Image (cartoon, coloured by chain):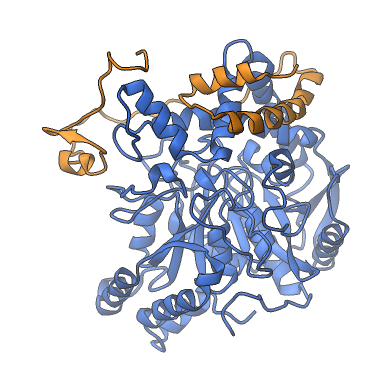
Chain colours: A blue, B orange
Amino acid sequence: MSLPTVKQILQSLAAGETRARDWVEMSLRAIREIDGRLKAFLWVDEEQALAAADRIDRAKMYQNAPLRGVPYAAKDNIVTRGVRTTAASRILENYIPPYNATVIDKLNQAAAVMVGKTNMDEFAMGSSTETSAFQKTANPYGEDRVPGGSSGGSAAAVAAGLVPFALGSDTGGSIRQPAAFTGCFGLKPTYGRVSRYGLIAFASSLDQIGPFTRTAEDAALVLNAICGHDPMDSTSSRQPVPDFADGIERGVKGLRVGIVRHLPEEGLEPGVKEAVERAIRQLEAAGAEIVEIDLPHMEYAVATYYLIAPAEASSNLARYDGVRYGRRAEASSLIEMYEKSRSEGFGMEVKRRIIIGTYALSSGYYDAYYKRAQQMRTLIRQDYEEAFKACDVIAMPTAPTTAFKLGEKLDNPLQMYLNDIYTIPANLAGLPGASVPCGFVDGLPVGLQIIGRPFDEATVLRVAHTYEQVRDFAWPKPVLGVAE
Amino acid sequence: MKITDETVSHVAKLARLWLDPQELAQLVPQLNDILEYAAQLQRVSLDGVEPTSHPFHEVNVVRPDVVRESLAREEALRNAPDQDQGMVRVPAVLEGGGGA
């Protein structure tokens, strides 16, 4: 791939060969050309982006800013002051946030330039971006395929070459799975590594913001800019923050890569399995030691997640009542207003999850569902603690399949949920995980997932970077994308 | 254990949602599929296992109680669907058909 990386853009700007305006114009041109069919963006503000680029080009104070002049897109569940933020839901169709998410403030300080907000599954609930109330995003490698989800717009925008990086959020795989489906790099940091202040909440004990990029090194650069403790998010961590790009080139000699004995393989496509196994052999050839580990409770992860996440969602989404902001339906009483506003404003997947969550939390069912899921979460977390005594990272497929067809799983929620089998455990255990492109099957990208110890993104990125240097598969051009 | 239309309607009401008959007809079998799948957790022994509500050990985080600037009233009201004299206005609480 010869589309410019964040690193190359920064080098070109530092050398004085280009200006921020050049890169922002290039991005806006690509969006105008491609996005009519791709539909990755919900909102693009050309004027604001160009004004920001000019400001950065003029002012000396931005000269050493770490992401100076690099254009990016943000998932539409990350609030932006004065810029409509909808979480792809009718209930927030006209919401103009009065504040910025911490990650947006941090990217402003780093002098990156936001060009627009991207499409997603409504409130990040979905694995295909099809539950958006507004539009369906295509996969750059197949117009009839989903881009994955829930951060499908951000993934598609990076994969098609519209922006060099984008922000997403990952609650059960919503960064890693779309990264795998669209052939870009995606990183879910450790829970607490990045502030969630201004991320529209879905499941607060699982949600985490992270980047989509073309390379592991670019993800390190973006993570450097967005991570760190934030007094506005009491769950953000005070763990020391390293320079994630530092040492990324050290290779994998002496590192132990764990592979899962008895990985649940129901629904795992043979082509995906083959590509991932080949990638692991290449890591071994590059010097890593491959060791077998056990994750005995992994088969229960989907059931656990689809009780815990809806339970938290049912509570988080209680705030959408039509009172202070968001959609309000005409009604003659307060209760009727709540019910009508919510029923008209939420789509089916959101209603489904609110109902599952309310049921799992309701008296009489709490012990049978929610509490058992929380207990299983403990066992899943302990599986990883045990596994990381024997290895430094764990490698497995990101998703069991390549990108499925638009509409294929929309009427069968359980089938859609099962696609998250390999990504969910890292959220339940709070661990960092990345998806790195590792091949193509029938023209569609496959992702290798690398999971690390808590707060050890550096090793995850180092393994991914090493693999990027040795991978040798043929990379087809996207059907929908910028000509190189 | 199958859940019925009545259960789903009741839970929807708890969540301040109403479902039209088509939505209900679509949802009930889907919810049964999902809950049947989730029932695998009931076949594992979890006696004595502590529940996890958060990935890492956390203690309450407090900050000094100091007065500071907050969002201006006009800003806070800008997204309100209806307002009057600097306050959010809502339909009557104690009258009408909703049964408050």
Residue located at (79% from left, 25% from top): B40
User: Where does residue A156 sit, x and y in percent of width and height?
Assistant: 58, 65
Q: With A147 as the anchor, is A77 left or right in this view?
A: left
Foreground residue among A59 and A83: A83
Q: In which quarter of the image is residue A342?
A: top left
Does residue B41 appear anywhere in the picture? Answer: yes
Asked if residue A389 is positioned above or below residue A166 in the image, the reply reads above
Q: In this orientation, which residue lies closer to the viewer: A138 or A202?
A: A138
- Could you tell me residue A331's position as x and y percent? 32, 28
Q: Residue A287: x, y in percent? A: 81, 65
Q: Which residue is situated farthest in the top direction here?
A: A364
A385 sits to left or right of A259? left
A57 relative to B72, above or below: below
Rendered image quadrant of residue A440: bottom right
Q: In this view, does A22 lie above or below A146?
A: below
Q: Which residue is drawn at 36% across and 21% down?
A: A335
As drawn, the residue found furthest toward the bottom would be: A17
Query: In the image, what residue occupies the spot 37% across and 31% down?
Result: A321
